[in-house]
């Protein structure tokens, strides 16, 4: 009888340990999933913004917008490297961007130049940098990995500064003439 009680208590203890381990494992994979989603979205967006910045260097009419494209493109390329490093550090695979809207936007901008390119590009940069700042702010507050949260936190100000400069450049552009 005592042996049966000991066996039952031992089995219950093993069951509790296994349940606790499973819960910890589930929580870890959920947080890893959250990190993976943030890193994948960030690398896709930053790579896209770098491509658009390179286009601005070549196709913009305004010297200010060409310089903006050059500065942001260089920064976004550095961010891409950092995001890949963070993903590798966390054993998170990153995949090529399959977003049709981003590919179509690149195709659209590849056919534009001059003042038309300038206005469309810099308007998009205001929106995209504000959006990226908001995504980083959300992850910096609620993310799980300390290094990824730090990346998000330090880039909030960068995106906000890029958005502010893009807005300044947009407002400095000549207004279109309606006929």
Image (cartoon, rainbow, N blue to C red):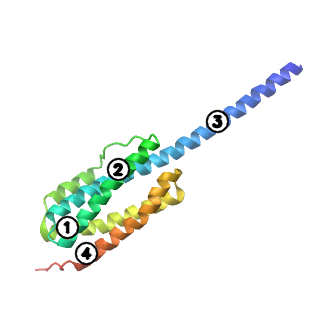
Q: Residue drawn 23% across and 66% down? A: 121
Distance in Å between CA atoms under marks 2 and 3: 35 Å
Q: Is residue 149 left or right of residue 66?
A: right
Q: How far from the left and from the top, in percent, is residue 106?
A: 21, 55
Q: Residues under labels 1 and 2: Cα distance?
A: 23 Å
Counting other residues with Cα less than 10 Å from the Cα at mark 1, is it few (<14), some (14-19), or many (20 or more)? many
Q: CA distance from mark 2 to mark 4?
A: 28 Å
Q: Quadrant of residue 93?
A: top left
Residue under circle 1?
66
The residue that mark 3 highlights is 21
Badge 2 marks a residue whose secondary structure is helix
Q: Residue 65 in the image: state x and y as whole percent.
A: 21, 69
Q: Earlier in the sequence, mark 3 or mark 1?
A: 3
From the image, state whether disc 3 or disc 1 is nearer to you. 1
Q: Nearer the viewer, residue 124 or 158?
A: 158
- Quadrant showing the N terminus: top right
Query: Which one is closest to the eye, mark 1 or mark 4?
Result: 1
In whole angstroms, how far apart are the C-alphas of marks 3 and 1? 55 Å
What residue would you read off at disc 2? 81
Q: Which mark is residue 109?
A: none
| Front residue of 68 and 113 | 68
Assign the C terminus to one quadrant of the image: bottom left
Question: Based on the displayed image, in which of its 4 quarters is residue 119 positioned?
Answer: bottom left
Indicate the position of residue 153 as horizontal and vertical percent values.
47, 61
Residue labelled with disc 4: 169
Q: Earlier in the sequence, mark 3 or mark 4?
A: 3
Tell me where residue 77 sits by quadrant.
bottom left
Q: Which of the marked residues, 1 or 4, is nearer the chain's N terminus?
A: 1
């Amino acid at each position: 009888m005592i042996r049966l009680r000991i066996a039952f208590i031992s089995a219950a203890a093993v069951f509790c340990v296994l349940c606790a381990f499973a819960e910890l494992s589930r929580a870890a994979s959920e947080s890893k999933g959250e990190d993976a989603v943030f890193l994948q979205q960030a690398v896709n967006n930053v790579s896209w913004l770098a491509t658009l910045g390179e286009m601005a260097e070549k196709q913009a009419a305004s010297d200010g917008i060409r310089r903006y494209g050059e500065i942001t493109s260089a920064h976004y390329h550095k961010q891409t490297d950092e995001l890949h490093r963070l993903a590798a550090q966390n054993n998170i695979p990153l995949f090529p961007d399959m977003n049709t809207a981003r590919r179509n936007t690149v195709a659209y901008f590849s056919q534009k130049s001059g003042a038309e390119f300038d206005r469309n590009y810099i308007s998009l940069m205001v929106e995209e940098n504000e959006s990226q700042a908001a995504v980083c702010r959300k992850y910096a507050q609620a993310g799980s990995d300390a290094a990824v949260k730090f990346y998000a936190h330090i880039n909030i100000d960068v995106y906000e500064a890029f958005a502010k400069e893009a807005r300044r450049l947009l407002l400095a552009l000549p207004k279109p003439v309606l006929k």
